[in-house]
Amino acid sequence: KDIDREISQILGLDERREKDSELYKVFSEVFDKTTIDTLAYFHRRGKIEHLLGVISTGKEANVFKAIDGDGNYVAVKVYRTYTTEFRRIWEYLAADPRIGYLPKDIRKLVFVWTRREFKNLQRAMKYAVRAPEPIAFGNNVLIMEYIGDEYPAPRLKDIERELDKKDFEELYEFAMGSIEKLWKRGDMVHGDLSEYNILIWERPVIIDWSQATVKRNRMALTLLRRDLRNIINYFAKKGINVEDPDEKFRELSGD
Ligand code: ADP
Ligand code: MN
């Protein structure tokens, strides 16, 4: 197939193809023409030299470890242009006051979704909430700082067994502090904060900002309540002395 050759050429996959067939399988499964063109564009610009491996295959997106033209690792999140999540994506975008025109075409809707995540990362950084640094975006591809070394950083859920009480206490403070800072200073809410979207590295890092939105969004309070509940319930189960989620919600929402 032409596309196969293009993937291999653009991304220098030929040598890796046999060695890492899982990688190739994911490529050929998710890379339609638009995705390949977009990756080729970033390849020419030196933002992506090679894709090195699959970090995660999700319902909406796949995340790859890559190396850029300067030899630094980057994380590349590639949204599927065909998604069964169309409805949910549409609803979330429709409620976001920052988004003007909503395309009817699913592919273009995914582009808007991708750009919004990039903007969310920028906004989180601006308010000093720990998130991967956004590097570039185009169509359904988002390039950001890679968290990890040879191996990607574990999620909180992955390493919870190795943590002690003090670690959990610090992480609880981190998570609650982030929710509060985002809401009060950034007028923003993550919306999907949990042990699955916190990476544990030198310092903890909050990832997966696709659902994040601004206070003015009519869904913002629902999302804030959800984040508070998820975080507080999780850390309560770990034996941490936690705040009351409803009280905290009232305090932040100002009711
Ligand atoms: P989703 O949960 O919607 O599939 P995420 O943004 O949470 O998408 O990414 C999926 C997984 O990829 C994460 O759980 C994490 O393991 C990994 N990942 C995401 N972003 C990075 C990053 N910047 N650095 C390292 N690993 C990452
Ligand atoms: Mn996630």
Image (tube, rainbow, N blue to C red):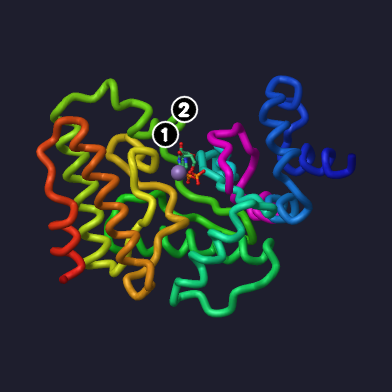
* Residue denoted by label 2: 151
User: What residue would you read off at disc 1?
Assistant: 148
Please state the horizontal and vertical placement of residue 9, each as a whole percent of the image.
Answer: 79, 40
Residue drawn at x 46%, y 72% is: 95
The magenta region covers 41-60
Quarter of the image with the C terminus in it: bottom left
Q: Give me the residue at 32% from left, 71% from top.
A: 215
- Of residues 213 and 135, the one drawn nearer to the viewer in this rendering: 213
Side (left or right) of 25 relative to 75: right
3 on left or right of 228: right
Number of disc labels: 2
CB within 8 Å, label 1 to label 2: yes
**Considering the numbered disc 1 on the image, is that residue within a helix, a strand or a loop?**
loop
- Residue 29 appears at what percent x and percent y? 73, 39
Three-letter amino acid code at the position of disc 1: Gly
**Disc 2 CB within 8 Å of nearest ligand 1 atom:** no
Point 44% across, 77% down: residue: 97
Depicted 137 relative to depicted 229: above or below: below
Left or right: 189 in relation to 29: left
Was residue 58 drawn as part of the magenta stretch in this picture?
Answer: yes
Residue type (three-letter) at the residue carrying disc 2? Tyr
Residue 82 is marked as none
Badge 1: few (under 14), some or many (20 or more) residues near its Cα, within 10 Å?
some
Q: Quadrant of the N terminus?
A: top right
Q: Residue at x 24, y 47 (%)?
A: 175
CB of residue at label 1: within 8 Å of ligand 1? yes
Residue 102 in the image, given as x and y percentages of width and height: 60, 74
Vertical side of 93 occupied by 56: above or below: above
